[in-house]
Image (tube, helix red, strand yellow):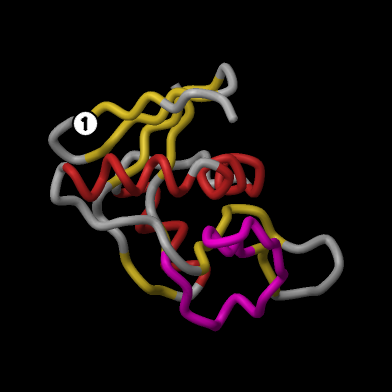
């Protein structure tokens, strides 16, 4: 597996891996989809794509090891992406960061969210 570089800022951490560089907020909330999108916008996000969340999931163990060492909350569980489902109305995709699974869920359900921005 590729080497993961994690660096820390005041309000977010940066992950460099597979030629990508993502800034991920420490701040996390459990919200329905529409509120989750507002949360991300307010916290410097906008790139909470399925692809980016699956990349974080793929390297979750290495990322979480660094987060633990720095006293930060780890990535775990289901996270909202910013992508609406193409299969169902009023649904959007969530990613299970423990295993990288992708599922479309009703927008009214609460899932975790963190702001992600591609650098």
Decide which of 101, 86 is in the foreground and name it: 101
The residue at 38%/47% (across/down) is 115
Q: Which residue is mark 1?
A: 8
Residue found at the very far front of the displayed protein: 1
Residue found at the very far right of the displayed protein: 87
| Side of 101 relative to 115 (left or right) | right
Per the image, label 1 sits on a secondary structure element best described as strand
- Which residue range is magenta in the image? 94-112
Q: Where's the C terminus, which quadrant?
A: top left
Q: Position of residue 39 (x, y in %)?
A: 35, 57
Specify the quadrant of the image occupied by residue 95: bottom right
Image position of 34 with respect to 75: above or below? below
Specify the quadrant of the image occupied by residue 49: top right
The residue at 21%/31% (across/down) is 8
Is 97 in the magenta?
yes
| Side of 110 relative to 88 (left or right) | left
Image position of 21 with respect to 91: above or below? above
Q: Position of residue 32 (x, y in %)?
A: 47, 75
Decide which of 86, 30 is in the foreground and name it: 30
Q: Where's the N terminus, which quadrant?
A: top right
Q: Residues within 10 Å of mark 1 (few under 14, many from 20)?
A: some
Q: Position of residue 15 (x, y in %)?
A: 40, 30
The residue at 53%/62% (across/down) is 98
The residue at 47%/73% (across/down) is 111
């Amino acid at each position: 597996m590729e080497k993961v570089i994690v660096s820390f800022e005041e309000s977010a951490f940066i992950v460099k891996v597979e030629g990508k560089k993502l800034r991920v907020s420490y701040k996390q909330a459990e919200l329905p989809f529409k509120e989750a999108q507002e949360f991300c916008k307010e916290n410097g996000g906008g790139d909470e794509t399925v692809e980016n969340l699956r990349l974080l999931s793929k390297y979750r163990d290495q990322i979480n090891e660094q987060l633990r060492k720095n006293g930060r909350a780890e990535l775990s569980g289901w996270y909202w992406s910013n992508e609406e489902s193409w299969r169902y109305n009023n649904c959007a995709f969530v990613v299970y960061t423990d295993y990288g699974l992708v599922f479309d869920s009703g927008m009214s359900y609460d899932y975790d969210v963190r702001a992600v921005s591609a650098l």
